[in-house]
Amino acid sequence: MTGVAALAGLFGAAFVAATILPAQSEALLAALLLAGVLPWPLLIAVASTGNVLGSVVNWLLGRGIERLRDRRWFPAGERALERAGRWYRRWGRWSLLLSWAPVVGDPLTVVAGVLREPLWSFLILVTLAKTGRYLAVAWAVTQTL
């Protein structure tokens, strides 16, 4: 696999992992880190960028949720949206620091769009959360070497 193909695959996996399809990108990041053919800061930057952009898709879906909520492919079920909405109303924009978390992370990014969180603050908080997760994965992988 070429470096460009590996980066494109990582970007795609990270993007999809943050959107409507169930996917996971941490295993691919770990494999690429273990392969050692690309610099770890580049891998984290590519994974983070893909994952944040996938979350922006969720934010955009949230902005138009009333038209899309009943679609079968919609990324979050009613219960997950309600739970994320409770978190968001309680903690406000700071709840986006949990956007990396399984189960509630993706619905939180949708709810941020529903509740009209400004894109600039959304991007800052989600970028911190998603990049932090990938840094933690990279640290964990390097501890096994």
Image (spheres, grey):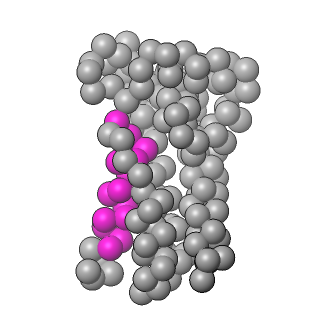
* 28 relative position to 21: left or right: right
Q: Residue furthest bottom?
A: 37
The quadrant of the picture occupied by the C terminus is bottom right
Residue at image location 73% in from the left, 26% down from the top = 91
Q: Position of residue 41 (x, y in %)?
A: 55, 75
Residue at image location 58% in from the left, 64% down from the top = 137
Q: Position of residue 125 (x, y in %)?
A: 64, 45
* 119 relative position to 95: left or right: left
Q: Is residue 14 magenta?
A: yes
Q: Residue furthest front?
A: 144
> Quadrant of residue 134 in the image?
bottom right
Between residue 140 and residue 12, name the one nearer to us: 140
Q: Is residue 99 magenta?
A: no
Query: Magenta part of the protein: which range?
Result: 6-20
* 32 relative position to 127: left or right: left
Q: Position of residue 139 (x, y in %)?
A: 64, 71
Residue at image location 65% in from the left, 24% down from the top = 88
Q: Is residue 99 above or below residue 5?
A: above
Q: Position of residue 75 (x, y in %)?
A: 37, 30
Q: Is residue 4 above or below residue 54?
A: below
Q: Is residue 39 above or below residue 54?
A: below
**What predominant SS class does the magenta segment belong to?**
helix
Between residue 123 and residue 73, name the one nearer to us: 73
Camera sees residue 24: yes
